[in-house]
Image (cartoon, rainbow, N blue to C red):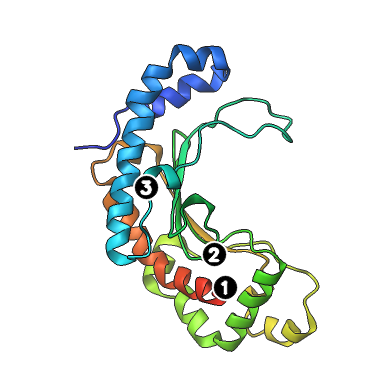
């Protein structure tokens, strides 16, 4: 049985031209029945399966799921609601940016799975680069692994044009060390939302990303 009906995506399609509190309040029961509650059930199943692989993940769906409300304080776009549902399954839930996680978003634009380190701060970036420099062959083996390449293609991220002197000589040998971000993603068609195998597909991507996630997380451990 599928986790979501076709109205999951249809809700967001209908929301797009009506992104205001009045419309949302009028459709709140529809949102709760066809979007919020099934997504909570889906995330609970993901947590259960991930926990079998990583026992440190002992969180509730509420700790993993992002609110549908947008933070519009510093945005020119004042639309109050997001166009998708999203969550992070990690040991520390959605606020965990270092232990290795899978972030996923589901909506009418796409189904997407993300891993890696998207926004490391200055100290974290230094530690990741040091970890790569000390383990060049292992790092390359991870991002050239067949499962990783088949599911994600490559490690992505913006690059520094000017590198700290201790890494300059390594850039030619390993260009990814110049990255400021180390993330990877996979996008699936929106119709995947109604697939009864959606959790299986997600877990297949989780298995493919976990070795690289673990490598990057190791750099950030105290």
Q: Nearer the viewer, mark 3 or mark 1?
A: 3
Using a 10 Å C-alpha cutoff, classify the residue at mark 3 as few (fewer than 14 neighbours), some (14 to 19) or many (20 or more): some
Under circle 2, the secondary element is loop
Provide residue 76's location: percent of width, then percent of height.
Answer: 74, 30
Write down the residue under mark 1.
Answer: 220
Q: Is residue 180 left or right of residue 97?
A: right
Write down the residue under mark 3.
Answer: 60
Q: CA distance from mark 2 to mark 1?
A: 6 Å
Under circle 3, the secondary element is loop
* In the foreground, 204 or 146: 204
Can you say whether 172 is above or below 47 in the image?
below
**Exactly how many numbered labels are in the figure?**
3
Residue under the point 18% across and 37% down: 1
Write down the residue under mark 2.
Answer: 98
Residue under the point 56% across and 18% down: 17
Under circle 1, the secondary element is helix
Q: CA distance from mark 3 to mark 1?
A: 24 Å
Using a 10 Å C-alpha cutoff, classify the residue at mark 1 as few (fewer than 14 neighbours), some (14 to 19) or many (20 or more): some
* In the foreground, 166 or 96: 96
Q: Quadrant of residue 186?
A: bottom left
Q: From this viewpoint, is residue 111 visible?
A: no
Can you say whether 183 is above or below 145 in the image?
above
- The quadrant in which the C terminus is found is bottom right
The disc, 3 or 1, on the residue closer to the chain's N-terminal end is 3
């Amino acid at each position: 049985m599928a986790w979501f009906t076709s109205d999951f995506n249809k809700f967001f399609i209908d929301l797009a031209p009506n992104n205001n509190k009045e419309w949302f309040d009028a459709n709140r029961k529809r949102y709760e029945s066809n979007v919020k509650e099934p997504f909570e059930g889906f995330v609970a199943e993901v947590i259960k399966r991930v926990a079998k692989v990583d026992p440190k993940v002992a969180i509730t769906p509420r700790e993993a799921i992002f609110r549908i409300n947008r933070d519009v304080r510093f945005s020119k776009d004042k639309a109050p609601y997001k166009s998708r549902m999203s969550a992070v399954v990690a040991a520390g839930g959605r606020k965990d940016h270092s232990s290795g996680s899978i972030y996923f978003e589901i909506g009418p634009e796409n189904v997407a799975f993300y891993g890696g380190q998207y926004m490391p701060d200055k100290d974290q970036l230094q530690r990741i680069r040091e970890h790569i420099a000390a383990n060049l062959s292992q790092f390359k083996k991870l991002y050239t692994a067949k499962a990783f390449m088949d599911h994600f293609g490559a490690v992505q991220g913006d690059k520094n044009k000017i590198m700290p002197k201790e890494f300059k000589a390594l850039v030619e040998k390993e260009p990814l060390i110049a990255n400021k971000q180390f993330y990877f993603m996979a996008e699936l068609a929106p119709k995947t939302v109604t697939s009864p195998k959606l959790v299986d597909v997600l877990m297949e991507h989780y298995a493919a990303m976990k070795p690289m996630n673990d490598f990057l997380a190791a750099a950030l451990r105290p």
